[in-house]
Image: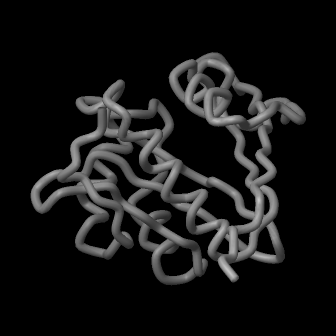
Amino acid sequence: MASALAVPRPMVMADVAEIWRIERAAYPFPWSKSTFADCLYAAGYSNWVLANRDTIFAYAVFSVAAGEAHILNLCVNPACQGKGYGKRMLEQLLDVARGHSAETVFLEVRPSNTAALKLYEGSGFGRIGRRRGYYPGADGREDALVYSLSIPAPQVCS
């Protein structure tokens, strides 16, 4: 279960060094440090960390526009995996999407990332396609599985 002390907050530039350390530990083909900086300032993405004062448990880069949202990167610190932090971060992203009136959330995931597949499928995402050779891989390229989730509009009390 994710720690009650871990709360989502917007990512800031001071987080990038730790995020990049986690990214390199989690992925064989990590995003660059400059990519995270660009996501913060140039791209206009919604960037989040799940953290307490001293520790970043998870982070995400998320795009929301024109009724759609796209999870570009959701990562849990490898030392913290299996404790609910990924689910908590995903819930945050879905709340943000609803707050921006997004109707559908999309993502791509490696078929080899079984933990992420379990998280997304367990959260109601359905597979809608495959992008051949999307990711770099140890033996060439790896496909991406494309998933989507329709999200209901927030309930309004009258």
Query: Quick check: 140 left or right of 13?
Result: right
Q: Is residue 140 above or below residue 105?
A: above
| Spot occupied by residue 6 in the image (x, y as percentages of width and height) | 24, 52
Q: Is residue 90 above or below residue 10?
A: above
Residue shown at the point (38%, 72%) measured from the top left:
10
Residue shown at the point (42%, 46%) measured from the top left:
88
Residue shown at the point (18%, 52%) measured from the top left:
5
**Which residue extends farthest right?**
129
Residue shown at the point (35%, 62%) measured from the top left:
8
| Residue 138 figure quarter | top right
Q: Nearer the viewer, residue 100 or 108?
A: 100
Query: Quick check: 10 left or right of 44?
Result: left
Quarter the C terminus occupies: bottom right
| Residue 76 figure quarter | top left
Q: Nearer the viewer, residue 130 or 84?
A: 84
**Which residue extends farthest front?**
158
Q: Is residue 39 above or below residue 152?
A: below
| Spot occupied by residue 121 in the image (x, y as percentages of width and height) | 67, 28
Q: Is residue 81 above or below residue 154?
A: above
Quarter the N terminus occupies: top left
